[in-house]
Image (tube, rainbow, N blue to C red):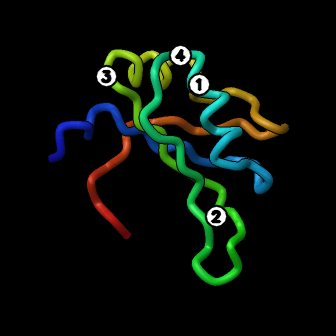
Amino acid sequence: MSDDQGNRLFVGNLPWSTTDQHLLEAFEQLGPVIEAKVIKDHYSGRSRGFGFVTFENSSHAAEAIEKMNGFDMGGRQIRVDRASSQRR
């Protein structure tokens, strides 16, 4: 487990139009964000509908889960949870 594992969040059910910048802007109001990344299809470059946000500390990450899980973003209720260390 890396040092930032507790700080890294999975964000699912994102609108297809969401960019890294949109994700950053949505979460940085809750605390300092190290990285906000929307995952894209390798071949088409289109969003896969999920991403990851890494906060500077775990307390901001916990607050983000509490406040942003179920938040309406572009007409979709996003899902926010701690990121697992497993890759699929």
To which quarter of the image does residue 44 belong? Answer: bottom right
Q: Position of residue 14 (x, y in %)?
A: 68, 47
Neighbour tally class for label 2: few under 14, some 14-19, many 20 plus, Cα within 10 Å: some
Q: In this view, does 43 lie to the left or right of 80?
A: right
Q: Is residue 25 left or right of residue 80?
A: right
When the figure is inspected, residue 37 is found, relative to residue 42, above or below; the finding is: above
Residue at which label 4 appears: 30
Mark 4: secondary structure:
helix
Say which mark, if any, is on residue 24: none
Residue at which label 2 appears: 48
Q: Residue placed at 38% from the left, 70% from the top?
A: 88
Cα–Cα span, label 1 and label 3? 16 Å
Quick one: 35 or 69, which is closer to the camera? 35
Identified by mark 1, the residue type is Met
Mark 4 or 3 closer to N-term? Answer: 4
Q: Where is residue 17 in the image (x, y as percent from the top left)?
A: 80, 53
Cα–Cα span, label 1 and label 4? 9 Å
Say which mark, if any, is on residue 57: 3
Cα–Cα span, label 4 and label 2? 24 Å
Q: Residue placed at 31% from the left, 23% from the top?
A: 58
Do the numbered discs 2 and 1 sit on residues whose CB atoms are within 8 Å?
no
Residue at which label 1 appears: 68
To which quarter of the image does residue 61 belong? Answer: top left
Mark 1 or 4 closer to N-term? Answer: 4
